[in-house]
Image: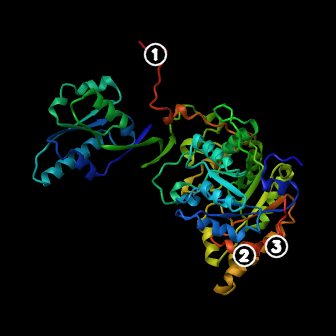
Amino acid sequence: MSLNTPSRLEKILKQGNLAVTSECGPPRGSDPAAVTSKGALIKDHVDAVNITDNQTSTTRMSSLAACIHLKQMGIEPVLQMVTRDRNRIALQSDILGAASFDIHNMLCLSGDHQSFGDCAQGQNVHDLDSMQLIQTVRLMRDEGKFLGGDNINRPPKMFVGAAANPFADPFEIRVPRLAKKVACGVEFIQTQCIYNLDKFERWMEGVRERGLDEKVFIMAGMTPMKSAGMAKFMKNRVPGMDVPDEVINRLSGVPKDKQAQEGIDICVEAIERLRECKGVAGFHIMAIEWEEKVPEIVERSGLYPRPQV
Amino acid sequence: MIIADKKPIQEIIDQVKNYERILVLGCNECVTVCEAGGKKEVEVLASVLRMHFLKEGQERKIHERTLERQCDHEYLEEIRDVVDQYDAVLSLACGVGVQFTAEKYLTTPVLPGVNTCFLGANEQRGMWTERCQACGECVLGKTAGICPISRCAKRIMNGPCGGSTKGKCEINAELDCAWQLIIDRLKALGRMEDYEIVAPIKDWSTERAGGPRKVVREDVQV
């Protein structure tokens, strides 16, 4: 087993374990406890924790700062970086900043359009796109070079991730699009939240046909539904989300005060099914503002205890 | 062509209200085609302004003129003899024409009468849509003739992003996803294998980012 970085996530995946990650959204303020208290809830049940980067284009504490708070409490962070807000100077600079705190994982994203957030009148940057950000961080790590060609003193040791959405359109390019990210140098993938398991498995078939599962670790994205209302919102209002009617019907079929538990059950059942899907290397559990439920999901899915590496 | 749109009438009134003698100056090029600043719009706007000031009990001298182009010295010279008769020129040309007129007539206020919007085409009667952001280094040969810079809300060079839904963009269900269009056309051209070519990091120095641009063509200089 050869490791490219000191990342614990990399080690766990390369040792053949099903990895478990989760995520924390930073607060809309500067209180570090808003990050550390979420981290404390999930610390022992996951291998690494993503920190989102101004998700849904709403201004929040910076992902890098929140990652540092987690790192200092012994949690391995995954720095999410979107190309929406920073040009190539700022992106490379923040990668170095993260590396200076020995943050060893990052997730390269384009980010939601700013019109979804609180600064709809702002500019977007998109100097690079997500694939080019993958190439950039690999260049910085493997060649020890900046985009401008100069050498980096102490290059960043980042395990490089990206997102994949098997449910966005057009479906036929979803596997080729993953192949492009692999060609750019991505090492792990965290997918969009999966509710349509049949479609995800169809996508994975295509992934395996091209041998991509041998080249990149694919972590299946899971978000438990809190209510039937949330499921309807996700289906109708969140771009690129595929929520089958059967999920909504199942949640609607139980009393309101039982819907959250039903949502957890659906999530656990999905993990149990998908861990048998060849090529799935782990799970990325995004319990949005519901971090306290992550331990239950991990334990009931048979993913606890986490391996010590 | 350059697409412009009308400015709100109140904004125009606020701009010109302190001037007694106003020349409303149209342009016979792009703004005529997109029906924002040609002879017809000059007539309408001049009439509206006259009526407005009459209603206020004020008489203003508001004249009309439409030039062949406002982005060309030769045609702008046509008003040299008369421009001093006005306190302000209200130009209905694009931002280029407004500036070129202002540069030529240094002591006359030249005010914009339209909002210059984008480089686009007349998609249907009364609707114009963007096609180009003049990045200075055309990639259309590699993107099946559809521009991701002007037509993708994130100008993603390796798209589509995860927000593409049923062929539409995440920001607006009526907006086509540029990358869906690119993929559809790659298919029509039998070139789907090109989809997997990774577009390299773009040199944006030929775009706005590089500062004001200039094209110098020695072969056509005199």
Q: Amino acid at mark 2?
A: Glu
Q: Residue at x 71, y 81 (%)?
A: A261
Question: Is the C-beta separation of discs 3 and 1 under 8 Å?
Answer: no
Give how far across and how far down residue B1 sits, in percent: 45, 37
Q: Which residue matches tag 2? A: A246
Provide the chain ID for the residue under circle 1.
B
Provide the chain ID for the residue under circle 3.
A
Give how far across and how far down residue B105 sits, in percent: 24, 28
Secondary element type, mark 3: loop
Q: Residue at x 16, y 45 (%)?
A: B18
Q: Which residue matches tag 1? A: B220
Depth-wise, is mark 3 or mark 1 nearer the camera?
Answer: 3
Give how far across and how far down residue A35 sits, in percent: 62, 65
Other-residue count near label 2 (Cα within 10 Å), few / some / many at <14 / 14–19 / ≥20: few
User: Is residue B132 left or right of B75 when viewed as pictured?
Assistant: right
User: Is residue B63 left or right of A230 when viewed as pictured?
Assistant: left
Residue B7 tag number: none
Return the residue nearer the eye: A98 or A108.
Answer: A98
Say whether mark 1 and mark 3 are on the same chain.
Answer: no
Q: Eyeballing the image, is B81 above or below A79?
A: above
- Residue A279 falls in image quadrant: bottom right
Give how far across and how far down residue A199 sits, in percent: 77, 63
Q: Which residue matches tag 3? A: A301
Whether residue A1 is visible to the viewer of this picture, yes or no, is yes
